[in-house]
Amino acid sequence: MVIKRRTIALLIGFSFIGGLDGYCKEAAQPAAQGGAAANLPAEEKKEPPKVLVKVNGEAIDELDLLGMVNTLIPGVSVHGSVTERKQKEIKKKAFEQLITSQLLAQEAKKQGITIKKKEIEREIKELQKRLKKNKTTLEDTLKKNKLTMEELEREIEKNLAVSKINDIKNKEAKAKALEKVTAAYLEEHYKSNKEKFIQPESTRLREILIKADPSGGPKVWEVARARSEEILKEIKAEKDFAKLAKEFSEDIYAPKGGDMGFGHKGSIIPEIEDVAGKLKVGEVAGPIWSIYGYHIIKLEEKAPPIQRTFDEVKKNLKKELEEVEFKKMKVQWVEDLKKKAKIEYLNEEDRKMMEEAEKKADDKDKKH
């Protein structure tokens, strides 16, 4: 029964998928059908499933693809609301996952990774718990889909082997990343990219906000503006801004006298940022309209751009570069497996789609 592998995929949920994402050159945005499996219905087909790609001679067929698609986006086989572009993206992602899974399963076999019976039994127990939450049983599910326990166990065994090789390579890649990101490596990176460690100019503002309900109509907004103009008159009469903010402002900064603290470009709403950029220290502006109401602002301080020192950024930079190197090594390992492998697309449209995706990923790598 050709629906079997698709059902197995949905049953076990491709538990290793999360681990495979990091192996894609491009963090493949979800993407999927079109081409050979584009019109494949969810219901059972009578004819044998069409083989779409062979990985070192091992077949991936249209039901494997559909199973992965439905795992990536549950229910996508009923994809009336999924755009054609999105379907193509999902399909690329599904192919990448399936090919990577096949390569990792083959590599696990080469390296003699074995799965114990009790590990498979543990996974089956977890599956039974999940099915129980959905008010069904494994036995009923297998019977309904004409699957045998042996078939399910084989697929779980394969997935566990993939997870194991994935874990092994993760540990190796992390260890190598730690070795590579030395103190000298960090310092060299900092010196070569000093402009990236400049803290931009920042400003410290005080604010008084008089709120207006966006759906309240013109009268509500007129009242809010009139109140803010009265407060502005008091400020111009040299009354203390901070005291007026505590008394009248309707935002979270009111208890602090309207003090918003320091913020750099892009950290405050554009309506305020545009006006604040034209003020000198000590100047007041308002009323300024926004969707929240009317604002009155005062520029308290300006801080020039600051070059952050190596010691200031070293700790976070180390973590960041270790993660970058770790991901590079993961990707490179699978890319090497792909280069050594014989990957044959039996559908011309699929071949062109995946070659185009690979070229885009290579071009992106060259830019970085």
Image (cartoon, rainbow, N blue to C red):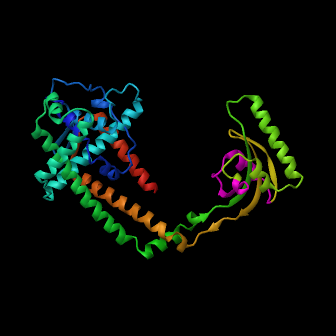
Residue 141: % across, % down:
18, 32
Pick whichever, 326 or 4, lies toward us. 4
Q: Is residue 138 magenta?
A: no
Q: Is residue 272 magenta?
A: yes
Residue 129 visible in rendering: yes
- Please, which residue is most extreme toward the right here? 237
The quadrant in which the C terminus is found is bottom left
Residue 63: % across, % down:
22, 33
Q: Which residues are magenta?
A: 255-281
Question: Which image quarter: residue 45?
Answer: top left
- Please, which residue is most extreme toward the front here? 247
Vertical arrangement, residue 334 with respect to residue 3, above or below = below
Name which residue lies at 35% across and 72% down. 179
The quadrant in which the N terminus is found is top left
Name which residue lies at 31% across and 63% down. 173
Pick whichever, 282 or 78, lies toward us. 282
Vertical arrangement, residue 175 with respect to residue 16, above or below = below
Vertical arrangement, residue 34 with respect to residue 194, above or below = above
Residue 278: % across, % down:
78, 53
Residue 341 visible in rendering: no
Residue 188: % across, % down:
48, 73
Vertical arrangement, residue 309 with respect to residue 270, above or below = below
Name which residue lies at 71% across and 52% down. 254
Badge count: 0
Q: Is residue 339 left or right of residue 145?
A: right
Pick whichever, 123 or 321, lies toward us. 123
Question: Which image quarter: residue 309?
Answer: bottom right
Pick whichever, 39 or 118, lies toward us. 118
Q: Is residue 46 left or right of residue 179?
A: left
Q: Is residue 63 left or right of residue 190?
A: left
